[in-house]
Amino acid sequence: MNEPALFIDIEASSPDEDGYPICIAWSTEDGVINTALIIPEDDWVDWDFSYQHSHGLTREHLFDQGDTALDVVKALAQDLGDMTVYVDGLDLDEDWLIRLFDSFEMELPFNIQPFTRFPPGLGFEEFLRYREELLQEHGISGFNAENNVYVMLQIANQCQTLE
């Protein structure tokens, strides 16, 4: 039996290495998209106010509506453990995931691969073209983790249909 196609995307406090995960979305084996806002850990202080405009989240909103980072780690490990999970490759998702799990002295329980390794023959430029078309077609933002996971699921479904 083939391994299911699982996808993950992260929004961060800033677009660089000092950023930390603030929102995460991932797909499950049955195609459901889970999302979680993440309450920052005490040592996660880097916050880019100009980047806040892109993702539309404030630190206060995270503290009010978020889940603890440990609860998010547990959910990810339960849903994705021992699997291969694909990221869009547009930002530092793997680094931010490692930072999340390192906070609890844990290693990632799943393998991260770029999305373009999932559907054979799909190059990065072609992926970007499909991604942009789907974002425009559905009128959704690419600065939203849930939207990005949805787009990856749609592209994966299209690629599997073509096989």
Image: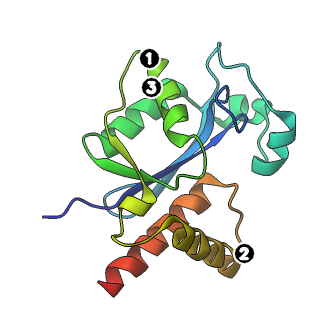
Q: Which residue is mark 3?
A: 101
Q: Along the line of sight, which residue is nearer the eye, 10 or 127?
A: 127
61 over 136 or under it: above or below:
above
Q: Earlier in the sequence, mark 2 or mark 1?
A: 1
The amino acid type of the residue labelled 1 equals Phe
Residue drawn 58% across and 57% down? 146
Q: Do the residues under discs 2 and 1 have CB atoms within 8 angstroms?
A: no
Q: Calculate the distance from the C-alpha at mark 3 to the C-alpha at mark 2.
A: 33 Å
Q: Is residue 23 something one can see in this rendering?
A: yes
| Secondary-structure class at tag 2 | loop
Q: Which image quarter holds the N terminus?
A: bottom left
How would you rate the neighbour count of disc 3 (Cα within 10 Å): few for under 14, some for 14-19, many for 20 or more?
many
Q: Which residue carries the number 2 mark?
A: 139
Q: Which mark is residue 104?
A: 1
Q: Would residue 30 be found to the left or right of residue 145 on screen? A: left
Foreground residue among 1 and 114: 114
Residue 150, position as x, y percentages in the image: 53, 65
45 in relation to 12, above or below: above
SS for callout 1: loop
- Number of labels in the image equals 3
